[in-house]
Amino acid sequence: MTDLRRLTSIRGLRNNNPGNIRMSDTTWQGKISKEFNTDTNKAFEQFESLEYGLRALMKNAYTWIQRGKNTLEKLITVWAPPHENKTGRYIDYVAAQMQIAKNQPFKKLDRKFFISLAKAITEMENGAAAAQSLVPYSAYEKAFSMMGNISYIPSVEKKRIGIIGIALVAGAAFCLYKYYNPRLWHKKRQRKKVQV
């Protein structure tokens, strides 16, 4: 595991928190408790290792995506809000690094997606030169492996599944109505008598 706490003065990297996640009650894996956190003003989380900080970055992004922030534009706007950041520039940088359109809904959340997202956010938050020289690629890989099981159904797929589900339920209800409706049943029996 990589520990940058004594190796740099860049705040996000010094805290092993390359995404600059603000202090909260979230019980992140590898989080240093508030009483032992040495961050100035204790404004940002601090982690035991860089890998734990990168994992928190990825998990935080995953949570926002699950809540509907399913494009880079939506995600980065909550990650780096305009009242604190140059959000448009941030979005453009991440989109260029990930090589996806900023308003394109995410289709697949996999190893490649999370590593390229974490790498771009780390570079934007801490400076590209520092991030590239101090954060080994293996730290991103380890962080992703520590995320655990992730599943994602894009919004378009959710809508399609919802429409199919409604159609199936409606079809089943109609069949049950037709089969169990006493008036329709009575008419079927009358037709059979007439045909005999």
Image (cartoon, helix red, strand yellow):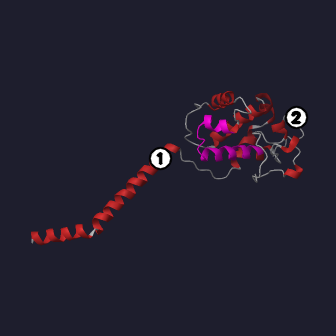
Q: Is residue 142 visible?
A: no
| Amino acid found under the numbered disc labelled 2 | Ser
Q: Secondary structure at mark 1?
A: helix
Residue 192 percent across, percent down from the top left: 14, 70
Where residue 95 sits, quadrant-wise, is: top right
Where residue 187 sits: x, y (%)? 19, 68
Residue 40 vertical position relative to residue 150 in the rendered view, above or below: above
Residue at the image point whose x is 72% and y is 33% from the top: 83
Along the viewing direction, whichever of 102 and 52 lies nearer the viewer:
102
On the image, numbered disc 2 is attached to which residue? 9
Asked where in the image residue 180 lies, by quadrant, the reply is bottom left
Question: Which mark identifies residue 159?
Answer: 1
Side of 96 where 140 appears, left or right: right
The stretch of residues the image draws in magenta is 53-78
Residue 185 is left or right of residue 1, and the answer is left
For the point 21% across and 71% down, the residue is 186
Identify residue type, mark 1.
Lys
The residue mark sitting in front, 2 or 1, is 1
**Do labels 2 and 1 touch, CB within 8 Å?**
no
**Residue 6's spot in the image, x, y percent?**
90, 40
Q: Which residue is painted at 54% across and 47% down in the image?
A: 153
Q: Is residue 70 magenta?
A: yes
Which element is circle 2 on?
Answer: loop
Q: Position of residue 191 (x, y in %)?
A: 14, 68
Residue 63 seen in this snapshot: yes
* Residue 167 in magenta stretch: no
Image quarter in which the C terminus is found: bottom left
